[in-house]
Amino acid sequence: MCRLPVEILTENFKWRCGRSHLTIGGELNEGTDRFEQSVKTPTLDIAQTCSLWHNIVLSRPSLWTRIEVDLNCDRQSESLVDLVTLYLSRSSPRELTLTIEAWENDGNADSLTETGLSMLLALVKEKHRWKAVEFSLSISVFDGLNFAGECRRSCDCLEELTLPDEMDAMDNDRTRTKFAIDAFHEMLYHTPELHTLKIKGQFSEHLIGTGVFDVRTFILDIRGNELDLDNVFTLLAMYRFLGSLDILPDFDHEPEIPLPPALPNGVSVIDSPLQHLSITVRDDSDSECRGLIASAYLFQYLRARELKDLWIRGTNLKDPADSEERDICFNSLTKFLRAPSASCKD
């Protein structure tokens, strides 16, 4: 295989490395039924095979750029920090694709081990090279970090961002996490290439009335009692170039039947340049305005004259117990689509 041209070897290495060049996390041990630490280093494994492969891999920083890390993996180990630092060094100056997690008891952890904190600091210092970053952790883990200062540095490369989950943190201690939330908000003003943004819960409230970000894909995960219906439409109106919206309607709002002709603030129509709309119907929250009835409100007031694709997903769309809410939702849907009728099919 060493006789193959370097270009073919490089393509083989890309295939071997797959979607993640470094993965630090946990896997379920079926024998003990416990999660155990798992470290996968395909790029490093290739580099340690022979001198030729070593030289090829080291000359291609792009093979070191995709990192997935669970900051709360089981053991305290400086070697994990060294491993992350090695990948960051060898990937320079290429852009980074990161998945940063912190799990604890099947949920988002609100604190980190010393090792996890050191790995997070190393990743944050390379913020100027972030291209796509997904945070699956509580924003509480940023407490005590000088993250606000880092967020004032420009993220010229950042194109896709999933903000960390702040719902539980805000419920527990609003003051303690406010600085971290403000810091992430500040970061959005320094991301000229950002086109895809995923926001959960109360983060949405911090964006309202503070500026317009020209993202083209907006994933809004709303949870019951987290966001008022008026604020959702205010938020959508701010996005001038929004082309794609993926939303889980679930509003802090007492529904009226029949649906009122206007929102409580007097707004009857919100025009949007949407071309792609995806709605997930769910009823697993305590909010009265959720699932089908929340979708009905969305269709009642939203206007998307350039819409090309509409997806509605949900496990209870054909449940006989929801027939009244489904009729209300489909009535709003027919007006939204300017169609004579709407129905649900398998």
Image: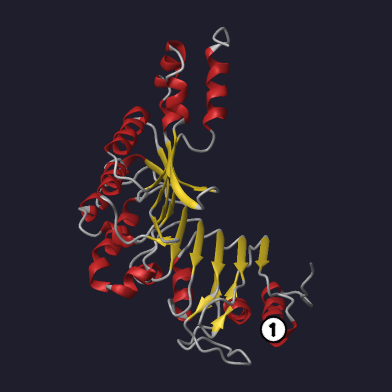
Q: Is residue 49 left or right of residue 91?
A: right
Closer to the camera, 22 or 276?
A: 22
Closer to the camera, 261 or 54?
A: 54
Farthest residue toward the bottom? 257
Here the colouring is: secondary structure
The crowd level at tag 1 (other Cα within 10 Å; few <14, some 14-19, many 20+) is some
Residue plotted at (52% across, 38% down)? 19
Quarter that holds the N terminus: top right
In the displayed structure, 9 sits above or below 322; it is above
Whether residue 272 is visible to the viewer of this picture, yes or no, is no
In the displayed structure, 8 sits above or below 137; it is above
Closer to the camera, 271 or 84?
A: 84
Q: Is residue 9 left or right of residue 131?
A: right
In the displayed structure, 281 sits above or below 78; it is below
Secondary structure of residue under mark 1: helix
Give x and y (percent) for residue 327.
72, 84
Name the residue tied to disc 1. Answer: 322
Give x and y (percent) for residue 82.
29, 34
Residue plotted at (43% across, 23% down)? 60
Q: Amino acid at mark 1?
A: Asp
Residue plotted at (63% across, 67% down)? 305
Residue plotted at (76% across, 75% down)? 342
Give x and y (percent) for residue 281.
62, 72
Q: Quadrant of residue 136?
A: bottom left
Give x and y (percent) for residue 156.
35, 43
Whether residue 20 is visible to the viewer of this picture, yes or no, is yes
Counting labels gives: 1
Q: Quadrant of residue 5?
A: top right
Farthest residue toward the front? 31
Q: Is residue 193 left or right of residue 282?
A: left
